[in-house]
Amino acid sequence: MPKDKRPLCLFLALLLLAGLLPVETYADTGMIDQPSLENLLLSVDGGEGKTVRSIHYMYDNNRYVSLRDMAFALSGTARAFEVSYADGQFYVTTGRDYVPAGGEGEPFPEGAAYATRPMALNPIQLDGRELRYLTFLALNSAGKQDCFMSLTDLAMQLDLNVEVSAGLMRLNTAASYRIDLEALREEGFFYEIHSALVGLADTGKVYAAWEPELIVPIASTTKLMSFIVVMDAVSSGEITLSDPVVIPDESARLSRTADGAIYLEPGWVTDVTELLCAMLLPSSNESALALAIHVAGSEAAFVARMNEKARLIGLSDGAVFYNCHGLPAFTDNLAATKIQNRMSANDMFLLVSYLLKTYPEITQITSRRYMELPGLHTTVGNSNPLLFNVPGVTGLKTGSTNMSGACLVCLAEAADAAGQTHPVVAIEFGAEDRTARTTFTEELLRYGLQRVGEDPDPAAVPVLPASAEELILTVLRAN
């Protein structure tokens, strides 16, 4: 850690001055032209089955189930929950029996067509906690607003032990939701992504990994390294977190492209702290560029620092940065080559381990759901859906390009069997879309949280290759 604590104190003080303002966020992904409809039977503890309507979105077994039907079927059991709809939001409260509103448990008529609204981040409150899942809205046969939610997402949120086969859903109320990663691995769980890893950032122990040495594009998870380089400049006294920053023309131009996250005008004056928040929360590429120019005079000089830092903390030779934000870039020649920042899951695990040990204050930003940035004339929301969906999550960063797929580096705190708290890091590169990214990474993270809670020796030797293990342990022992 830097010996001078003044940058950290100023950093935290500036964050406390930033207000919170809720922002509604929606993301339509298209209509279901002819959804595959299914009338599932839900048997609770071996009892008689009750009908739960299900939509297979795009592919078989990608089930989205009716919240009202599930609540109706579970009423009177140990897993009962209440569902209500008001002011454009669904409210789910666990531990309460559902009061029927009409139309629950009525099957789809044979050959029926069913109209839903486009998939969107429809507002759902679970026990007063905001959730961020893509769902479908539709009116049921009684004209009541209903919500269709992924069965996997619902099971994780309500801690439901569910099995589905041949149109029958079996639920054991005495058991909890549990992830058997080895069984999932055999079923091809990891084949939908490029690479993945989950482990403890403080000890280097890895609980599971898939193609951890594969070098892949990393999109906006790049910004974690950009944060490190900016904070190195703060720690050395080169800049301060309260430095005024004049928005350069390059950043303003980038903000007007399809890759812009925050509209910026050249000449606006903000500060380093606001730009860091904008870079990490809504993944503002234009803010990352403004920081790079402020710190090093040009993006090229800043990127040189990024690559130098990669070597200093022991990232592999395959870890290379071409820009400060993670967008694709083309080489400057006639037969231009499209290039992107890249590294492996092992590299990212080492980078996060170093980051959390050296600049743990990053979570003071990445744990925020919303933040007002007056210097940038906007209020921003956090792009990390697991911050909303999994209690205890404090960061870190999303990313997405066509080549990289949808990526997420997620951090949560969990206690081991002895009560010692550890940072659990789940890294996912290459999901086909944001929906898959959310579900996959949540399952991976929950598996890590599950494992650390049962682990009698979380400080045991990591299961990484010897070279990577040595590097991580060297970083963790440093300073």
Image (cartoon, rainbow, N blue to C red):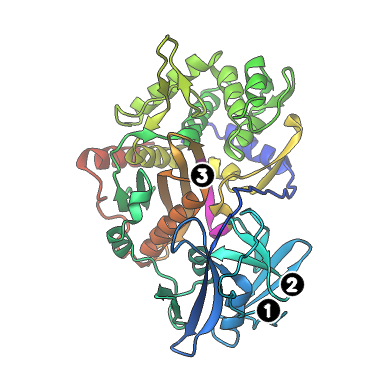
The amino acid at mark 3 is: Leu
In the displayed orientation, state which residue is furthest to the front. 111
Q: Secondary structure at mark 2?
A: loop
Q: Is residue 99 left or right of residue 150?
A: right
User: Is disc 1 surrounded by few (<14), some (14 to 19) or many (20+) residues within 10 Å?
Assistant: some
Give yes or no for contact between labels 1 and 2 (Cβ–Cβ under 8 Å).
yes
The answer to which image quadrant residue 290 occupies is top right
Question: Could you tell me if residue 58 is visible in this image?
Answer: yes
Q: Which residue is mark 2?
A: 143
- The segment highlighted magenta reads 389-398
Q: Nearer the viewer, residue 5 or 56?
A: 56
338 up-or-down from 94: above or below: above
Which quadrant of the rendered structure holds the C terminus? Answer: top left
The answer to which image quadrant residue 447 occupies is bottom left
Report if residue 436 lies within the magenta region: no
Q: Which residue is mark 1?
A: 103
Spatial CA distance of label 3 from label 2 is 41 Å
